[in-house]
Amino acid sequence: MPGRGTTYGDVMVAHPHADVYTRVGLTRPDHCVCQAERHKDTTYHAAPDEVRAGATITPMVVSSLGRLGPRFVKFLR
């Protein structure tokens, strides 16, 4: 993204029928990619799109069924 320094992508493939997603009762079509994005933010202790030391880490989550996470779509646009 221009003017924002370096952007690193943290890629993850999530399967919507995995126990980690089904046991919490999430049923929206994008539930697993949204949850995986939140997990990535927690891993880095960062707010979404936070810039640290001139770098941004963007979760690039895709489900095994082909759905892209909202922040991955935003990055691609």
Image (cartoon, rainbow, N blue to C red):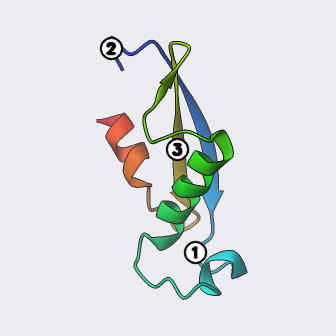
Q: Which of the marked residues, 3 or 1, is nearer the chain's N terminus?
A: 1
Q: Position of residue 21 (x, y in %)?
A: 61, 77
Check disc 2 and report its element: helix, strand or loop: loop
Left or right of 28, for residue 40: right
Q: Name the residue carrying label 1.
A: 16
Q: Name the residue carrying label 2.
A: 2
Considering only vertical position in the picture, is 21 above or below 60? below
Residue type, mark 2 in image:
Pro
Left or right of 59, for residue 23: right
Which residue of the protein is positioned furthest toward the left in this rendering? 77
Q: Position of residue 64 (x, y in %)?
A: 59, 65
Disc 3/disc 1 C-alpha distance (Å): 16 Å
Badge 3, how many Cα within 10 Å: few under 14, some, many 20+? many
Q: How many marks?
A: 3
Q: Name the residue carrying label 3.
A: 60
Q: Residue at x 53, y 43 (%)?
A: 59
Q: Quadrant of the C terminus?
A: top left
Q: Which of the marked residues, 1 or 2, is nearer the chain's N terminus?
A: 2
Check disc 3 and report its element: helix, strand or loop: strand
Q: Residue at x 37, y 53 (%)?
A: 70
Residue type, mark 3 in image:
Met
User: As rendered, which of 32 and 67 lies closer to the eye?
Assistant: 32
Q: Which of the marked residues, 3 or 2, is nearer the chain's N terminus?
A: 2
Considering only vertical position in the picture, is 62 above or below 18? above
Check disc 1 and report its element: helix, strand or loop: loop
User: As rendered, which of 6 and 16 lies closer to the eye?
Assistant: 6
* Quarter of the image where one finds residue 53: top right
* Quarter of the image where one finds residue 67: bottom left
